[in-house]
Amino acid sequence: MDIQISIAVILGAILIGSIPTSYLIGRFVGRIDIRENGSGNVGASNLTAQVGAKWATPVVMFDVFAKGLLPVFIASDKVLGLGLGIEVSAGIASIIGHNWSIFVGFKGGRGMATVLGTILALNFPLLVLYGSVPALGVLFTPWKDSAVWWMIAVIVMPIWAALLNLPVELVWFSIAFAVATALKRMASNSLRDDQDSISTKLLLTRLVFDRDIADRNKWVSNQ
């Protein structure tokens, strides 16, 4: 019975993660398909650029609490008591659903808000350390490109988990999230350089900067 319930929770996490909140608000409020506007990303950042910043708040709140925190909470000892392994699996399932939504042609956001809710439910100190990297980087260094700092935060999260001597399930969660983030970044947008080909340089640029070129202003102006 526990196996069936665990499978149901994980499948439910994929479904709730797949709810394309940014797409829905873009469609019903902005009367646009954000997959075909701006960066094409079905996430809060593109929604902000295309529809307005005020609409990003409900999207982020839903992604943090409904997509990220809720599936983990349901699997936790506070509700079903399915164990940390299922909590972690539900969290990753929701992030995958968000990144590759089954409702909008397997497009989606980057899962950054969703993972905040997931880590909040799993381990608060890890959340603080994870969020401190982009916060400190943007505030106290000359490099204000948040996409770079978020990628650094993703990469070092497994290290934080290990240094905090957290359960191995949380280390694997951190690694799985890093892999999902890397795949999402490299597989997004055109994946073509100025020679209309896929190159190692382009993939590295996508991985580090989350766009096809390093110059953010030029990238935004060309969308």
Image (cartoon, helix red, strand yellow):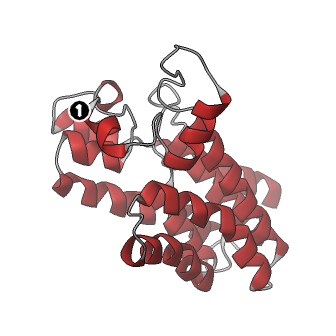
Q: Is residue 52 left or right of residue 173?
A: left
Q: Position of residue 153 (x, y in %)?
A: 58, 66
Q: Residues within 10 Å of mark 1 (few under 14, many from 20)?
A: some
| Quadrant placement of the C terminus | top left
Q: Relative to residue 78, is residue 6 depicted above or below?
A: above
| Quadrant placement of the N terminus | bottom right
Q: Relative to residue 21, is residue 85 depicted above or below?
A: below
Residue at x 42% of width, y 64% of height: 143
Residue nearest the viewer, comparing 83 with 186: 186
User: Which residue is situated farthest in the front direction here?
Assistant: 142
Residue nearest the viewer, comparing 27 with 155: 155
Q: Position of residue 20 (x, y in %)?
A: 40, 40
Q: Position of residue 25 (x, y in %)?
A: 24, 42
Circle 1 is placed at which residue position? 27
Residue 219, located in which quarter of the rendered image?
Answer: top left
Q: Secondary structure at mark 1?
A: helix
Residue nearest the viewer, comparing 2 with 11: 11
Residue at x 36% of width, y 34% of height: 39
User: Which residue is situated farthest in the top direction here?
Assistant: 196
Residue nearest the viewer, comparing 36 with 167: 36
Residue at x 56% of width, y 48% of height: 208
Q: Is residue 147 left or right of residue 160?
A: left
Q: Relative to residue 165, is residue 208 depicted above or below?
A: above
Residue 66 seen by the camera = no
Give the total of numbered labels. Answer: 1
Q: Relative to residue 86, is residue 163 depicted above or below?
A: below
Residue 136 seen by the camera = yes
Residue at x 34% of width, y 63% of height: 61
Q: Amino acid at mark 1?
A: Arg
Q: Position of residue 80 (x, y in %)?
A: 67, 71
